[in-house]
Every structure is written in structure tokens, then in C-alpha cells.
Amino acid sequence: MKLEKLVGERFKERPSDCVVDSHALMVRGGYMKYVANGIFSSYMPLKRITRKIEGILREEMDKIDGQEVSFPVVMPATLWQESGRYESIGKELVRFSDRNGSPVVLGMTHEEAAVQLVREYGQSYMKYPFMIYQIQTKFRDEARPKSGLIRVREFTMKDAYSFHTSQADLEEYYDRCHKAYERIFARAGIPEVVSVASDSGMMGGSISHEFMLLTDIGEDSIVICPECGYRANMEAAENIIEYTRTTPSEELTKVYTPNKHTIEEVCTFLGCDEKSSCKAVVYQRNSDDRYVVLFLRGDLEVNETKLTNFLGFDIHPAVITLESGLNAGFIGPVGLGGDAIVLYDRSLKGMNNLVCGANEEEHHYTGLDMERDVPNAEYHDFAKIQAGGICPVCGKHSITISRGIEVGNIFQLGTKYTRSMGMTYTDSEGNTQHPIMGCYGIGVGRLAAAICEVHHDDYGPIWPISIAPWQVHLCAVRADDAEVKAYADKLYEELESRGIEVIYDDRNISAGVMFSDADLLGVPYRAVVSPRNMKQNIVEISSRDKSIKTTASVETAAEEIAKIISDALAAI
Amino acid sequence: MKLEKLVGERFKERPSDCVVDSHALMVRGGYMKYVANGIFSSYMPLKRITRKIEGILREEMDKIDGQEVSFPVVMPATLWQESGRYESIGKELVRFSDRNGSPVVLGMTHEEAAVQLVREYGQSYMKYPFMIYQIQTKFRDEARPKSGLIRVREFTMKDAYSFHTSQADLEEYYDRCHKAYERIFARAGIPEVVSVASDSGMMGGSISHEFMLLTDIGEDSIVICPECGYRANMEAAENIIEYTRTTPSEELTKVYTPNKHTIEEVCTFLGCDEKSSCKAVVYQRNSDDRYVVLFLRGDLEVNETKLTNFLGFDIHPAVITLESGLNAGFIGPVGLGGDAIVLYDRSLKGMNNLVCGANEEEHHYTGLDMERDVPNAEYHDFAKIQAGGICPVCGKHSITISRGIEVGNIFQLGTKYTRSMGMTYTDSEGNTQHPIMGCYGIGVGRLAAAICEVHHDDYGPIWPISIAPWQVHLCAVRADDAEVKAYADKLYEELESRGIEVIYDDRNISAGVMFSDADLLGVPYRAVVSPRNMKQNIVEISSRDKSIKTTASVETAAEEIAKIISDALAAI
């Protein structure tokens, strides 16, 4: 491929709307173009990268006995009504009506379609286990698409669905898939990806893992215990609390706290630690705006995922009205009016000598004793774990928190879909059973962007050879020099005839522009033919990651480049 | 791949809702499953077929310098408003609003997206020509999806867009693409596909061709002149009329024609030939229901494509009300009331002694002389050409009409999109110009189904090796026989190690079921291991199309099968 003919523009300036590096470099390098919020077109270099990623995904899915199928993008609403998700999923699920007025959805995931495809096939236990997968376009109407290909609305995803007759069989397969994912990320150049326990969210099921590439631009907070290896997404991480009751328990005393609304202001005013306060965080139920008041220790943050999972319905931060019976800024567990759902985080369990709201304008209490003053409270885990917190596995104060990009996920779904959609099989004893499912996803574009996040410098991406758009970037510096042009043309042909993927720049432009374009395309190996090199009968060969910088004679250059590439491919 | 693990069901009975053979066989063979009207999921065998077709498409597009890109499925309406198609296309274009209320469409074709992708890139004449293509899911909300994968709503299409600075350059590229299409169809096993001149329809532009696979189940009528080789889609074929005025011209005479409404009834009643009648066909404009009355010779049919192209707006068959001023069944050109748009087909030009409606209940005229009685009529070509009609190229009465499935199309679009969407470049003299476009489509699923239509027997598809889901179907008849099983297992491994794609049936079932499953999967070559064959130390080798039926010794079977396959692949 001649670079001169490559459709797409490359430029120097970082676009002002690009927050993360992968986005900026992929726009600057002519990989992608904005079409609408969270919707992009791809130019050839990105298409070549994603096709290579898809090739790796196919190979690894086939290795674990996956069968490639395809499901529709547009699906009848009835299918999603069967599972109940037509109602339970929010606006991310695009719903519209076709020309005949039939309600349809755009697929954002395909559990329903997978069950529909195999519901008749899987009627005997002898057909199990099996796994089907597809690589297909999906649409999720994200409220806040951002970070280029990291969080989009339209995306290509490899999604796989396995079906089993026992939990043990699912777990065995889940583990095989976990290992396949490790191979996928290693082959794609990011072996450092780690799996973390995660929350299953709208997918249902109990056990699930996310594969996280740790990087500061990641949207997820990852809880890691370096002592025992425990890893979890913040959303799913249990928060262990040490019991710190003090003596003696003082009396509950109302104090005047003028203009002190936040827990910070109140604690500063009263000269106490936030850890000795009980704060209220208020939400409302999405369906009817009923209030939910959660009390937790003043220094902790709410883990909304755990809260939502406990409640079983969706919530949003509250707008506290005068009619609510709630005294915004002064809410406390003693004498709370209104009909809110009231919850207590376990950080408060058994605690005493706390500051809290007095449910009265400009007043707080001191000396709150949960056991004495709120005797009927039940305590659950609703708070975010903090750095330095207690590891829920080894019990040490060892927790660290990192940022990560989720590049894959795997779920043990149980019978959520097969039960709701009426998929059954007859077991070996003639009984009717619901198959047990697992599902396994990897977003192709996000993976490409994540790889770019950890493999780039200021000048462009540094693509791992397994997914690079081309293998060699051949530069003919001073292509107006007949000798340079003739030799570079010949080297281009020789490399291509060896099956090497070459992008060939024979434009009559400055070496500076040529090299900065090459940096933006991020091809792992570069060969430079120039008048100076020709005088010495050599070709300069270097790697984009700077680990190789060598020369070869013009006679053996093709062979030496081929060797470098085959060695690099063999090393994956 | 072991057939025992292949997800999908195969069965004998032809499903009652399948009209065409490809649909019936692909349902019976476990290739596809109905999800909604015109929307299907694919099982692994179909996915393998379509991936091979996509491989051929990619190779041939790359050979003509195409660059693979990708466009979104969901696009902002603004893009389609720029081209004007947001308004001009009917309900086939799915329109809905995203969560923020922004109107979006589902891509049914991607001219707008292609222009959007390259609008900034293509600003200098030096960038031209170039071609970009994608293989992507599309959605067209067809009113009447039918015939399985032949006419669906959701489909995968290879769509390509070329950009040029002169008509001559477009024509040269158009011809290259035409040749690439011929290679594609030949490689896919249907070299008999012919290209025909076609109507450009909603795509715009002037010259276009469709690639037609001639078969009786085709939805299109293809006009062919065996004398000179002229070929056109009925929609685009000119209808040449010989002038047949008779003498003398009789007087216009009103006659009583009780209960005679159709032109056939009237002609029978009056004892005249339909060719001597002037019939009216009535439509209404979609936008405001204004009437359109078309007069043409009684024996001819209306070519609605030519009519719509002439009118420049969409129409539908009329509902004639009492207020319309039209006398249904008695409409004629003399004394016609109402404010309809009135058109005359050139079959009436100069004609006389015709029967026509008298615009009065139960009355017709005889003796209509178009020159004398309708002196201001203008005549255009609105009628369908008939078998035995005059070839518009060689002038002989040689026209034959066949049915065909459209398996591809190519269009010279001109500047329709670049002009409306403001895409310009600076030519070598510094002038601003609009690039000239071509576009080129092939539907992947429809192509698979079309191939099945012409390559099948009563028992199943007979896939050409280039697109077959597997290359060899290995049957172990009586897999409960240890010798059979051991040898078949070994042959399976040997074939796979040679890189041959094998589907291996080692189920302990009857030979009858095994062979009928093999017929349904349509794999081109079959190898049968059985107790009887083992006694003779042979393997039976046959081809699905019955051209090969031979045996090989158990020692050399793998090698001989490999040779048959490599010969077959080489012959493509």
C-alpha cells in the first residue's frame, strides 16, 4: 500500500475535544472520524487493526469450542419482553417502531437472541455444553459517550454465550474462557491486563469478572490488595469496617449549627472528626420519586452499585422539596419525618458519640449512640472501600485503588434468561431443567484504544505487531532521487512478495513530515532508504518502540526485515 | 468440527412458509433462524459461507485499489438532510430519535457517510481517484420481506464508493469494478451472472447496471435480446412501438357498455382487439393524493419506474372517489373532468379507431383518433416492453423476458452527493469542482441464497467449494464399530492436519440420517468409512454434485482427498 493513496488526514495539532491520548492520536493519525456523539467512521488503518483483533478473537473462541453465528442488530421488542429487560433497562436500550408499528430494539447485548437461536436445539442434555459467539455491531445509547473509542454508542463486540447442564460445568467452561481471555490480551500486546471480581449489573447472575487494563485514564476504580492478590471493581468490593465504639456514651444533645450544612462544615464547627459523624445521603426511586435516605459514617462515600443491588430498583440523587418532610442539611436518624426508605451502612453499626442531623433547621445532635438511639436499625454494606482499607480476603489494611479500562468481561448468568424465556432440556433422568448460561464479551474498538493508551509516545501509537495496521513502514527519503526511488520500489516489491504488510511512503516530501506521519501510523518496524544510505549501500532499520536501531546492506535488507518480523510474530 | 456438536437443527419437512428452495433448504439445514419478519440469525454453517464470500469480496475490492473502512449503522439525520434523502426516501429508511431527542437513521446505504468521511481529505485533485468500501450490517425497512435471505430487512452488504475528477476516469473505474464483479461471481460459483442496464432509482445518477442471476424465482424481469446481446432490467428497458394507424378514421361515437369496466370486458363486448383500445391507469401522488391518469394502449402494462422517474415524485395506485371527477371504469381522454395530471404513453401516438372510456357511467367511445380528438397530447415512454417486442438496440422483434435475482449493482452517481453535501476539490488549474462518484454494492446473504437457488437438488444445497461451509464431509457409518471409529478418527486428524476443513459425523446413527444430514449441509466432497469399506480396505469418496464417485485405499485416502480439493480450489 502506498501511503500517498491512503485515504485520511494526518496532522500535528492535538484536537481540543480529545481528552485521552488514544483519542487524540487516532484522530490525528487518520484512524477515525467523528460522525455523531459516540459514533465514528473508521479509515483503513483502524479497520486493519480491528480486523486483526477480530482474527485473534475468532481463533481463541474457536479454540474453546465456540461456534461463530450471528444475531440481528434490530430485534423485536417481544424478545426483550420475554426476559423482562425491555422494561428493566433504561434509555441505553434504543426502542422504536418499524414501519408497521411493531416495537423493536437495537441490540446492545444478545442474551435474548442467543436463547432464541438455541431454544429448540438444546432440548436434550446430550447437546450440552455448547458455546456460540458473534462479532457484530451493537448500539448502546450512552448518556455520556467520551474518550474516543473507549466509551462510544455504536461499537463492534465479540459476544459469546455458553450453555450448560450444571453449575460445575459452567464453572469449568468459565475458567477456560478466562484463560482464553488472558491469551487474547497477551496476543494483542497487553499481557498486563488483570481480571477483577465485578458487579453483574443488568446482565444478572452472580459471579462475574472484568478484565482491566490499569491506566490512569480508566473510568473504573480497581481495588487491589498487594498482600493477597485480591482484586475487585470498586462497584463490587466489600467494605470491611472495624468496630470503634468509645466510652463513655454521652447523652444525645441538640446543638445549634447555624449555616452548617455539609458534614465537613458541621464537624469543623463542632471540632470533631468526620469519622465520628453520621451523614445522610438522599436518593429518589426512579419510578415514583419516593425518597431513600442512607446513613453512613461521615468520611465514607456511597457505593451506588451496592445500594441499587440491595434496593432492586434504580435511583437518582434526590431533589429535596419542602413537602418531603426532610430537612436538607440536617437529616439524622432520630426523629426523621416523612415516608422515606431508611437504610444504614454497616460503618455505623454499634457506633456511639456521633454527630448527626437533628431533623430541624440549623440543628444537629451530638452524642448519638446507634444502639441506644436507633435500636431497630439493620446494617448493610453500602460504602466504597478506601485506599488503606481492610482487604476482605486477607484482612490486612492493604487496599490500594487504581484506575482501569475494562477491556473484557465474563459472567456466570445462571438461569436468568433460560428461565424467563422458557428454555428447557430433558436431563438424563427425564426431568425438565433450565440450562445454565455464561456470557463473555470483548469490545473490539475499545480494545484497540486501550492498547493505544498503554502503547504510545508523544508522536503516535506504537502498535504491537499482532494488531499493527502494517508490519513495515518503508520510507523513501528524497524519492526524487532516481537511485533512491528505484531501490525503494524494488525493496517494496520484495517485501510484499514475502507476504510482509508494507506501507510505502514514496512521496516527495521532507523527511520530517515523512517520519512524523510514520510515527502517527505506529507501524512497528521502519526501513529508511535515502541518498546518504544509498551511498553507504545500506538501509536503516528501526523499531517504533526504539528497541531496534540497525542497518542492513541493500542486498540483504528484505531478508533481514523479514527475519525481524517473523521473530517478532513468533515471540507473541 | 464434529457434526454432533454443531448447533442447529436439521429436518426433512419443507416448512410451509418457505416459498423458494434456498429458503426452505437453509431452514431445513440449520443455516438460519427466523427472528422477525425479514430478520434472521445465522448458525455456524451460514456464517462460514458468508465469511468466505466476504473474503472473496475483500480480495477483489483490494485488487481494484479499494480501501476497507467502516461507516456507522446509526447515523444522524442531519447527514441525510444534507443530501436531501432524509425527505425523499420513504418508509424503508428507519428514522427515530436517540435519548437526547436527536433524529437519527439506520444506514440502508452509505453515500452520505462516504462523502462525510472523505470531504476534508479530498480537497486537492492530487488525491484522486480513490475508492473506499465496507462490509457492514444494513437495515432497510422493506414493506414485503420475502424469500428467506433474498429479500430481507437486515442484511450484510459490501458497499463501495469511488471518487473521481472526470467522467472518463469514473467510467474507467466503473469498468474495472464491473470486471471485478464478474470475477467475484465466477469465484463464488455463479459465472453465469449477467449485467443488465438498470434504473438508478433512489441512488440518483444516470448509468447503472445490475448483476442478475437468471432463475425463475427471481423478482426482477430481465429484458434480453438474443440477437444483439442487449440486456436491461424491465424497469429501465425502453419500449419501442410501431406505428399502426388504420384508415379510414371513423367518427367518435358514444356506445352503451353496461357493466363493462375492464378493458378486456369492453373489447370482448365490442368485438375489438385490445390493441385497438386506449386504457386509463390511475395513480395518486403520495404527498397530496392528487390524481395521475395515464393513457396507454389496452394490451400494454405500465412501467411504474419509468412513470415515477418522469413525474419526479412517488405515487400509489388510486382510490377513485365520487368527488374525484373521474368515472372509474369509463375514463377516457375526451371530456375528462377533474384536475388530474394526464399523461399519454407513446403507444397511442398517431393511433386512431380506438375504443376508450367516455367519462360517463356505462359508456365508452369508439372511433377515437388521437391526432384529431386529443390534439395537444404529448407522448412519452411509460409502458413495459413485452416478449417478442422490438429491441431498442438492434430493432429486431427479438425481445425475450427472463426472471432474475439481483446479486449486485453498480452506479455512476455523478455529483449528486458531492454537490448537495458541499464536497469540493481544487483542480490543477485552481478551480473548485465537485468530485464525481460511483457506488458498487453486493449483498452477502442474498448472494449466498442466490447461489443456493442455482446449486441445489431436492436433498439440499450443493455449495461451490469456494464458499462451502466445509470442504469434506467425513461420515463414519457404524461408529460403534471400533475399527471404523479408529480409522475415521485418524482420517479426520490427518485431513485437518493438512489444513482441510472437515465436518466429521461420528454419531451412532443410521446411514440414511447421516447422508441426508450431509446432503443438507451441501459440503462438496464426502468420504465414507464403513464396516463394508473397511473390509475392502477402502474409503468411498464422492462429490455432492455427483461428478465424482470413487474409492481410495485407507492408506492413501487423506492424500487423495487433499488432491481432489486442491484441484478443485485451483480450478476456480
Image: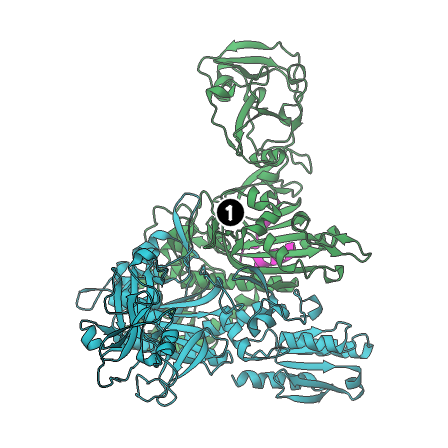
Chain colours: A cyan, B green
Residue B191 shown in magenta: yes
Image coordinates for residue A394, horizontal then vertical, percent: 31, 88
Image coordinates for residue B419, horizontal then vertical, percent: 68, 49
Residue B543 as seen in the image, left or right of residue B79:
left
Q: Is residue A497 visible?
A: no
Residue type (three-letter) at the residue carrying disc 1: Leu
Chain to which the residue tagged by mark 1 belongs: B
What quarter of the picture does the N terminus of chain A occupy? bottom right
Q: Secondary structure at mark 1?
A: loop
Disc 1 target residue: B93
* Rendering quarter of residue B456: bottom left
**Is residue A536 shown above or below A513?**
below
Residue A76 as seen in the image, left or right of residue A434:
right
Image coordinates for residue B464, horizontal then vertical, percent: 50, 60
Which one is in front, B469 or A452? Answer: A452
Residue stretch rendered in magenta on the structure: B177-198
Q: Measuring 40% from the left and 44% from the top, which residue is drawn there?
A: A101
Residue A214 as seen in the image, left or right of residue B130:
left
Q: Measuring 68% from the left and 62% from the top, which residue is drawn there?
A: B121
Residue A75 shown in magenta: no
Which one is in front, B113 or A179? Answer: B113
Q: Measuring 50% from the left and 21% from the top, which residue is drawn there?
A: B324
Task: Tell me the crowding category of disc 1: few under 14, some 14 to 19, or many 20 or more residues within 10 angstroms, Cα based.
Answer: many
Which one is in front, A208 or A504? Answer: A208
Residue B512 as seen in the image, left or right of residue B279:
left
**Is residue B544 shown above or below A131?**
above
Image coordinates for residue B26, horizontal then vertical, percent: 40, 55
